[in-house]
Image (spheres, rainbow, N blue to C red):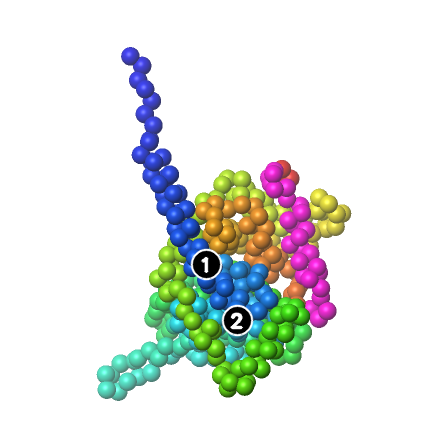
Amino acid sequence: MPQTPVTNSSATTSSVQSQSSIADQVQASQTSIAAILTKIESVVLGKPKECKLALACILAQGHLLIEDLPGMGKTTLSHVLATTLGLSYQRTQFTNDLLPADVLGFSIFDKESNRFELHKGPIFNQVVLADEINRASPKTQSALLEAMAEHQVSIDGVTHELPTPFFVIATQNPLFHAGTYPLPESQLDRFMMRLSLGFPDLKAEKKILLSTSQRTNQRDKKSPVENEVVIDHNELITMQDAVSQVSVSNDVLEYVIALSHVSRSAYTSNISTLHTNQMNEPISCKPLSPRASKALLQAAKAMAFIDNRDYVLPDDVQAVFYVVCQHRLEMQPSQQLGASHSDLTRVANQILKHVDVLNPLGHM
């Protein structure tokens, strides 16, 4: 008698149950997500999109670079992110005389115990704010590389693990400001996202001024809202694990691959033969590495998670493409005096227009 083919029903059932479990986790986290965003947006006024992207960066286990003029709220955003998520936090002001040991820590010989003891630096916090990172020397900037890539540091030949979760937020002033050192490409590539807050609108700026006036009258530098903890670090880790399990279809994977391939083709073809499908303009950019593709996919997963979905759409990829890829694509630094938003996003927009969402690999 012909035998009935055996199917691996247990594996299929397990996969369905796993996806159902992820969907349940996404749904269960929505109350906390809404509370976190409400708290952040109540402190960083008029910037809901930027607050959402910053939260997505943390959920995707990336690092964040905030680039803007002084006084735009970069440090405020960093502080409220840490306090909202219940994470230990320390700010380090980067200056031209800052040494790597000031960031990592150093060993001091203890006569009583007859051994060296480690005095930990600010890098051993869960959220590290490197304020005005491009005012420090390249040697000090590079001290963050191992920590950002491997969540560990080496001091005097000994490797030390960093706490979990670990998140670096760096702020940087535009390069036309005096006393700044451009970050090397290897350092820029460690940041999953680069954000720019921009000027507040009229309504938001009025609220900022009224809030500042009230605090001055009350002689209260920190409002209770800014110090309110919404979730603890264990819940954050659970969310990060759920984000990594958000499903990605083959079509979305091909879309991410196609976007990266366009940048590589433009770079290797001397930037003269590749044009957008809507405008006859050459694409001038650096190529996106596999690390950039991974960061783009992980950030898209985080956006889907925040939007109450356990699967990624091309819209999620497009929503994070600029903040994840623009600082990796630029041939020259973007923060030039007088540059408009359209100038800063031109390269990213060109690549997005070149790839057809319905047939992403059609141009290859």
User: Quick check: 287 left or right of 25?
Assistant: right
- Specify the quadrant that holds the N terminus: top left
Label whose residue precedes the other's in the sequence (1 or 2): 1
Residue that carries the numbered disc 2 in the rendered image: 43
Residue that carries the numbered disc 1 in the rendered image: 33
* Residue at disc 2, secondary structure: helix
Membership of 111 in magenta stretch:
no
Highlighted range, magenta: 336-361
Q: Residue at x 60, y 73 (%)?
A: 207
Q: Residue at x 44, y 55 (%)?
A: 30
Around disc 2, counting alpha carbons within 10 Å, would you say few (fewer than 14), some (14 to 19), or many (20 or more)?
some
Q: Amino acid at mark 2?
A: Val
* Residue at disc 1, secondary structure: helix
Q: Nearer the viewer, residue 75 or 335?
A: 75
- Specify the quadrant that holds the C terminus: top right
Membership of 346 in magenta stretch:
yes
Above or below, 288 relative to 334: above
In space, the residues marked 1 and 2 are separated at their CA atoms by: 16 Å
Above or below, 29 relative to 113: above
